Amino acid sequence: MSFDLLNIGAAGVRANSELLQTTSKNIANLNTKGYIRERTEHGTMIGGMVGRGETVRLLNQFAQQQLNRDISNQSYYEQFVTESSRVDTLFAQESNSLSKSINAMFNNLQSAVNLPSSTTNRSLFMTGAQGLIDQMDRLSGIVVDQSSIVNDQLDIFSQEANNLVQKISELNKQVASQSALNLNSVDHSVLNERDQAIKDLAELVDIETLDGENGEKLVFLGTGDALVMQGGAFNLFSNKGDPDPNHKSLVLDIKDKNVVQLELDSGSLKGKIGGLLAFRDEVLIPAQNQLGQIGLALADAFNQQNKLGMDLDGNIGGDLFKIPTVGGFAYSDNTGTAALTATLEPGRGNELPATDFQVTYTSPTTVEITAVDAKGNPIGSPTTGTIAAGVITGTGDYFGLQMNVTGAGATGDKFLVKLNQQAATSLELATQRPEALALASPIRTEKSADNNGTATISAGTVTDTDPTTSAFTATTPPTLNDGPYTLTKTANADEYTLTSASGVNHTFTAPANGKDILSTVGAAPAPFNNLGFTFDIEGTPNTGDSFKISFNTGGFDDNRNGAALDGLKSSDLVRQNVESTGSTESHKTFNEAYADIVTGVGVITNQAKTNSAAFEALASQSSAWFESLSGVNLDEEAANLLRFQQSYSASAQVISAARTVFDTLLSAAR
């Protein structure tokens, strides 16, 4: 009996010693990152003795996977909010407002229109125009700086992810080697370190894990791509810019050293890396494209309207802004020798959407032009173009682009055109001369003093001043070809005769309402076949009443074209949609388009803040659940320590009692 008591007591002391050791280990690792609480479990042997204990980690894999998923979502929105809030703050500052610069330029223009002969007021307009360009460059610089920060952080996070992937792979090898004979023989510190590495990787990118052979953990991206595989094999992240070296994309280097393009779906990648990519795709690139679009639309509108006027030197107006020409980015797998350049076709600024464009060779002489979003996905239907003499031409929606190619392209070759993004930082004034501002109209109209009817002639509207396509000459100073012209009412209803200075006549029937009276001139002889201007007749002319149309020589106090320039402020000239939304495109004014940028960034940022708060609460809940199962509870461990101490003392007393009984038996036998 005493022998049994001795064995039972000894087993109890050993078992409680193991329990005390496990409890002490838990308490000591209270603040150890990644430590999983352990528990020692014993079984009962024959004779009532305590068997060998088995120490296990108290880990709930479902709770662990849920925590990793919530951490990925939380990190995604935290990173997104951190980056977008900075841009939102910068764009919202009044000192950075593009609308303020636009309004200042138009206010200066209004002053010049009020006193068109003043070079001082014209100089103020040129100063305001340069201020607008500088402000656009500053705003674009903010976006470019943030893009550089994104690239730098993407490099850092990718390297961190690679280090963690390699670490997990190495720890898998250790686990596999230790568990070759018995899975329970694996050092728990190795498992804790591996779980912590997986958790750290989940902060960078969304992952899923599966149990492999010999205790290994297989790690996959949320997109399904493998990171850590069986037997220690693993794939690593790298960054490359194709075709734009400044726009880095995430790629995966697989085992045979090929490069596989990942599906850059920010919603699937999650984590800090996904947050960075989403910020770039949803905030930076759209903002940069919209800024460039506004600048190009404004510059083109001013150039075209200024060309319809007469400047202070008495010449037909020219360009006020210099529209940049950009090179298309060639994809790395192109096999041809073609190179592509693109700019804005004059007069087509209102056709340019705020996107990038992909040009794909469908044959050596034909291409498809497609608007693409920040991720390179096509928007709308492509337009087919033909290459003739190095120029891409054709019918359809060319988005206002004017593109030239050199060299020979092969079928399948692709180019990415980023006209909007590059234009925001490269707009310039075409001239610094205040005299170049064409405020006057190049024509003047007047009725004859001998007219008997009640008809009057409008000041006229100029639509074209190009000497090759209009009645205006290329001489210095310019004039009207074989002008001035005389418009005379005939005896027939709504019928007029146009007569040039040399006596060339053309009789035609005008619209009955007297509006746009030259629109029905028809197949007229030169110089009436392409006049480049029109006017209205109001009232009732009598037979023989005449009207004179001449070049506006010396009309420096005229501000008719200046009023048209000032009207650009309220004109809808900024295209909003790639695809048609009905019979006409949806357009907005310059200020409305800029307000859309600021509002869009603010809305996206606030929505991200809301989502961030929600996922932060979920992550906190998951963390609390995980810690309740696997974390060290100091109160619980202190209670266990006291309980196991008492149990140890009791087992020691059993041994003492057994010894006393044994001694008593020996004494009785003497």
Image: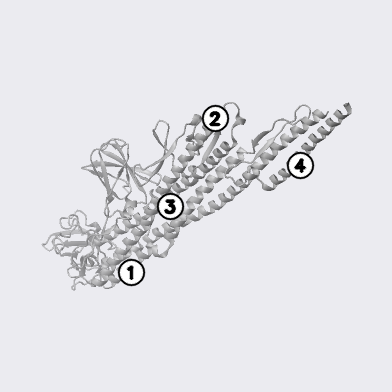
Neighbour tally class for label 1: few under 14, some 14-19, many 20 plus, Cα within 10 Å: some
Q: Which residue type carries mark 1?
A: Asn
Lower position in the chain sequence, tag 3 or tag 2:
2
Q: Which element carries disc 1, helix, strand or loop?
A: helix
Does residue 586 appear in the picture of this structure? no
The residue under label 3 is 283
Mark 1 and mark 4 in contact (Cβ < 8 Å)? no
The residue under label 4 is 646
CA gap between label 3 and label 1 equals: 31 Å
Mark 2 and mark 3 in contact (Cβ < 8 Å)? no
470 on left or right of 598: left
The colour scheme of the drawn protein is one colour
Q: Which element carries disc 2, helix, strand or loop?
A: helix
Q: Nearer the viewer, residue 217 or 336?
A: 217
Q: Nearer the viewer, mark 3 or mark 1?
A: 3
- Choose top left, top right, bottom left or bottom right for residue 244: top left
CA gap between label 1 and label 2 equals: 76 Å
CA gap between label 4 and label 1 equals: 89 Å
Disc number for residue 176: 2
Residue 491 percent across, percent down from the top left:
20, 64
Quarter of the figure with the C terminus = top right
Q: Nearer the viewer, mark 4 or mark 3?
A: 4
Q: Extreme front residue here?
A: 670
Residue 100 percent across, percent down from the top left:
37, 65
Lower position in the chain sequence, tag 4 or tag 1:
1
- Choose top left, top right, bottom left or bottom right for residue 115: bottom left
Q: Nearer the viewer, mark 2 or mark 4?
A: 4
Disc number for residue 404: none
The residue under label 1 is 107
Q: Nearer the viewer, residue 107 or 15?
A: 15
Lower position in the chain sequence, tag 3 or tag 1:
1
